[in-house]
Amino acid sequence: MNADQLAVSPPPTSPKPDIKTDIKPDARPDVAPTLRIRALMLGDRINASSLELGTLVSSTPAAFRVHAGLAVIFRYGVVVLIGLLPSEEKVLIDGLKPRVIGELSPYEEEIAQAQLCKDESSEAIQPGGPICLAKFSDDRLLLVADALAKSTSLARDERRVAAVFDVIEPFARELAEHGRTPRRRKGILRLIGNALLVQQRVAGRVAVAEKPDVLWEKPELDRLYARLEDEYELKERLDTLERKLAAVSETANALTDIIDTQRSLRLEIAVVVLIVIEVAIGCFQIWSGIH
């Protein structure tokens, strides 16, 4: 992939910087230019096939040069906007809405700042601060977009799993305190379905554990991506989410098995009662015939 650079620090005499959006050089010479990076989860999926927003920078993920910035589209519903004005972002998002499947309201959002540093050896991410990059090249910005998109998607999935836990808790409390199971088997099946959806999304669509394709062509950027993974705690959050999903699935399955066992027991009791009644009727008829 072509590592074309978004413009960095324009000379003071330049009438117009290459990136006219968020790179705003401070009047002080010791302040490095920055880029505003905004990740939005619009829905469950975004259909990026045959999409044309500008000059194509990358096909996987679909990335386009829009105005003087970048727009990176991820199929799992996230768009990352780099170096765009708010008005330009709104126009782009409105244009993507017809391609969004399962639109969210409100959108999940994360914002970061990228800042130029002196050289590659000083590339680092300050806790809660800007992401320091040696240059605003397409390759580096795609790595930042990938990490930020995965973090945004994980935030949404973490919220969904937390909501499932909130529903499971009353079921477990009723079982612990009163020894009774909920009669709403349909509700429990919905819990299992929600857990499966999140699990399928994390493992299939988002593929948090997989590294972005750009690293196959630029392996020297692997250290930068490792720092991004550490900053957004992608692996740790994925492990935690998978453990929670396993707990949800096991709890829901256990409740379902208990309910099914109780139903089977009631059915067996009903059959025994019917047999006893039938025997009693038969005995009564025999006794009536004798007398």
Image (cartoon, helix red, strand yellow):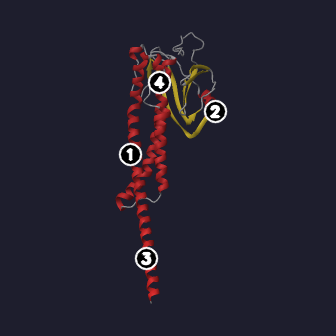
Residue 247: which numbered mark, if any? 1
Do the residues bearing badges 2 and 1 touch, measured as CB atoms within 8 Å? no
Residue 63 is situated, as x and y percent measured from the top left of the image, at: 56, 23
Q: Earlier in the sequence, mark 1 or mark 4?
A: 4
- Farthest front residue in view: 290
Q: Which amino acid type is shown beneath numbered disc 2? A: Asp
Q: Which amino acid type is shown beneath numbered disc 4? A: Pro
> How far apart in space, not on screen, are marks 4 and 2 (Cα)?
27 Å
Q: Which residue is mark 4?
A: 212
Give the side of residue 53 with respect to residue 185, left or right: right
> How far apart in space, not on screen, are marks 2 and 3 (Cα)?
74 Å
Q: Which residue is mark 2?
A: 94
Q: Secondary structure at mark 4?
A: loop
Q: Earlier in the sequence, mark 4 or mark 3?
A: 4
Specify few, some or many for label 1: CA neighbours under 10 Å numbering under 14, 14-19, or 20 or more: some
Q: Secondary structure at mark 3?
A: helix
> How far apart in space, not on screen, are marks 1 and 4 (Cα)?
29 Å
Residue 279: which numbered mark, if any? 3
- The residue depicted at 42 percent of the width and 70 percent of the height is 272
Q: Which amino acid type is shown beneath numbered disc 3? A: Val
Residue 127 appearing in the image: no
